[in-house]
Amino acid sequence: MALQIYNTMTRSKEQFVPQEPGKVKMYVCGPTVYGYMHIGNARPIIVFDMVRNYLEQLGNEVRYVTNFTDVDDKLIRKAEEMNTTVAEVAETFIAAYREDLEGLGVKPATLNPRVTESMALIIGFIKELEEKGYAYESGGDVYYRTSKFEDYGKLSRQNLDELQFGIRVEVDSRKEKPEDFVLWKAAKPGEVHWSSPWGDGRPGWHIECSAMAREFLGDTIDIHGGGQDLQFPHHECECAQTEALTGKPLSNYWMHNGFINIGDEKMSKSLGNGWLVKDIRERFKAGAIRYFMLSTHYRNPLNFSEESMTSAEKSVERITLAESNVKHRLELAADGAQGEVNSEINDKLSAIVANFHARMQDDFNTPDAITAMFDWVSLANHTLANNEAAPADFAALLQAFGEMNAVLRLTPELEEEIASEEVERLIAERVEARKNKNWSRSDEIRDELGRLGILLEDTPQGMRWRRK
């Protein structure tokens, strides 16, 4: 089965065929860095990390670009609140964003271009639009002439009449039409600004992504992603800007993830109802957060609660425990993983992994892919209960698990942890203390290991440890 992706542009699943075999160009709109990441912001980050991981597992080289919007109205207001500069606000929250990415088990993007470092690209793009008649200057601002682009509204299925009467549109006498949107904003007194052919100012939001995507990925992207809320106006405006210049599709496939809700409300910074990722990470590990995100299909809405996170945590613990036990049995084998894999285990593993891929290739159906992982847990536990199971069986189990987990990244090996060597050293010291009947030292080490998230277990094969 070939990979099928639901394309927002066509409202249908389509076979994914990159423009260049084995290479995928992917752009996902990044954060406006004026505050800490909340759990709603984290959904597209984890979703498109998963998409990238699976594309790479299929053998593709993925060039993944996601930007930083490091200047806009919100950053200017935040700088005023903090009595600092826009640049310092951006640096503060970019650093926090990167820390959250690491804490979520998300791989860094190939590139993170910044708006402030792309000003020449943006100004050049606007000049090209103006030369072609798609942009006009009015009072120091520059606007996009939507009436000239016949396909405006094709992504979101809007038309200009509906936009005028059914959608909130800023009314501005400087515009030719109410639905025209700003490409360049004239500077206000005291605001950060850049020189341009239209006077001092700064770019509008939509033009930034068009300019950076074109510069770093070319005229046409394979996959353009983002949250459902970006479909209109942001992605619609990107299409209008880029396609007016190139005459080519901005992206061959458009992917949009659903909202995260608290109760009946979409989670957002502006509503002030967002749980911050940095706070959630103090309570839950990356695997639990990723499980929560991926246990619902990316296009469906997702309801956030502490109960749902606790449930995700328990599910990941089941997976982690099975993986840890399989590793332990393999480590006990004196001759490693030599020998033949039991044919029944081999057949069952092949079926589990095949099912995992079938689910992933059906528009990244992660809920069913996770079900395949629990089929693996059942097989692992059944094999662990068999004292006749061979080391090769456990090696095959781990190989299959690794193939699936490389995509979803649910287990704690992918988080920052205390080194295993240090754990082993402390356990050896505790064993020695118990031999010498130094019970107080033994208890101290047990408590220290507990604080580090390590559980000690007595097994028929001797003492072993695992992470909580």
Image (spheres, rainbow, N blue to C red):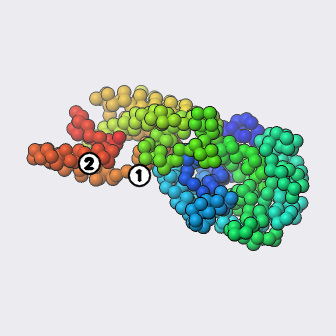
Give me the residue at 50% from left, 30% from top.
Answer: 371
Give me the residue at 58% from left, 36% from top.
Answer: 262
Q: Is residue 279 left or right of residue 178?
A: left
Q: Is residue 430 left or right of residue 306?
A: left
Q: Element type at marker 1?
A: loop
Give me the residue at 21% from left, 38% from top.
Answer: 462
Amino acid type of the residue tagged 1 in the rendering = Glu
**Front residue of 376 and 210:** 210
Q: Quadrant of residue 245?
A: bottom right
Mark 1 neighbour class, 10 Å CA radius: few under 14, some 14 to 19, many 20 or more: few
Q: Element type at marker 2?
A: helix
Name the front one of labels 2 and 1: 2
Q: Position of residue 410 (x, y in %)?
A: 46, 41
**Front residue of 384 and 255:** 255
Amino acid type of the residue tagged 2 in the rendering = Glu
| Mark 2, residue position | 448
On residue 416, the disc is 1
Quadrant of the drawing holding the C terminus? top left
Give the answer, above or below, for where 195 lies relative to 170.
below
Residue 81 visible to an observer of this rendering: yes
Q: Is residue 100 left or right of residue 435?
A: right
Mark 2 neighbour class, 10 Å CA radius: few under 14, some 14 to 19, many 20 or more: few
